Image: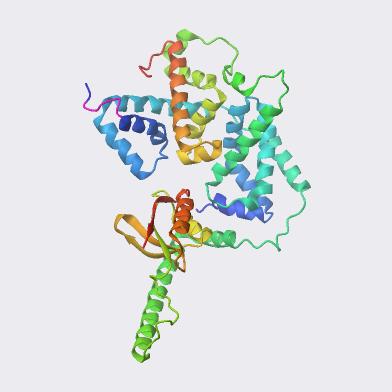
Amino acid sequence: MQTTSDEVLIARIAGGDRLAMQVLYARHHVRVYRFVLRLVRNEATAEDLISEVFLDIWRQAGKFEGRSAASTWMLSIARFKALSALRRRPEEELDDETAGQIEDHADDPETALVKKDKGSALRQCLTKLSADHREIIDLVYYHEKSVEEVAEIVGIPEATVKTRMFYARKKLSELLKEQGIDRGWP
Amino acid sequence: MNATNPDAPERSEIENLLPWHAAGTLSRRDAQRVEEALARDPELANRYAQVRDEFSETIHLNETLGAPSPRAMEKLFAKIDAEPARRQAGSFNLGGRISEFFASLSPRTLAWSASAAAIAILLQAGLLADIALKETKTSGYETASAPTTDPGVGAFTLIRFAPQASSDDITKFLTANKLSIAAGPMAGALYKVRVAVTGIPKGELANIVKKLQEDKVVDFIATAE
């Protein structure tokens, strides 16, 4: 069975096709939501942002030129919305960078258990990374974006994408070391 | 000790590509380079195992994040319904319609259509060649100032397109910059591309080359005679 490409759906959306919008939403909303959630770290905010992101997709569909993959374009919109929401937060709330240093779960890490389960330790350390580092790790590993696509989404040169990924992984190793897991690198 | 110097810039460059290799998002050329380096460097292979762990756990972590509630979709479509109606009849998106048409064809239909089109093109080429030969036979002489459609006239560049660029990307690039392919592919996958129908000063041509060089589709570009 053949599925309609995202590009065709977006062309239909540009013409006001509501059904095409439903298909595109069904296809991408979970991934876009997770990307936003990892940035804003608040489920209610992420859920509100999802409607805003897809409303922008509806409004801007006519401007989509297909120069990049549709998912890359959508993640760029999502990132812009998430960062704008973070900037709108009241001053007493945590800024993005500070929030990035704090774990998702308030309970103490059970170090002994973590030592036994390297996977769980890695996941815990992934949540402790700064927003910039979380973002790049997610884009490369979860959203499967190439160097060029990450550069387009984040708005940085390709060389910086590679450097940032290197430092994100280095930080991950340091966090693991704090948990008692030495990867022998860096 | 490894045969490969771990401090070599090549090694560090390859190591930086490991995350994308794990995700399968490298170009074929880079993926090949990484594969070769992994095969000859056990330390690099160790690092790659770490990258694969990170890759796997990042997916695991994201998959536990759940999904938005149906409320998000209801909210979205309520907002869409409140938007002003689009002028569907007035907006004629040719590109969208063409891609929609091809997307609607089954692969078999598409293959048959492509074959039929190829035969039609061959027939047409044969007819054109025949006409050209007849014209050559019947024509007398031509003045030196007569208009020409000589493919050698104009300003040209040599371009090698990026390996990851699709034919669609290349077509868009050529159309957007009003370029046409005059010859190729030649040795080194180079194409001779016409940038202007008349000759232009070298400085202007160099500026055009500089501008085109910035496009992702271009792997290599140089001026050509």
* Rendering quarter of residue A17: bottom right
Residue A52 in the image: x percent, y percent?
69, 38
Left or right: A71, with B41 as reference point: right
Q: Quadrant of the C terminus of chain B?
A: bottom left
Residue B5 highlighted magenta (yes or no): yes
Q: Residue at x 75, y 43 (%)?
A: B79
Q: Residue at x 44, y 53 (%)?
A: B166
Q: Which residues are magenta?
A: B3-8
Left or right: B17, with B78 as reference point: left
**How are the colours assigned in the image?**
rainbow
Residue B153 in the image: x percent, y percent?
41, 70
* Closer to the camera in the image, B36 or B187: B187
Residue A14 in the image: x percent, y percent?
65, 54
* Rendering quarter of residue B202: bottom left
Left or right: A77, with A175 as reference point: right
Q: Residue at x 39, y 71 (%)?
A: B151
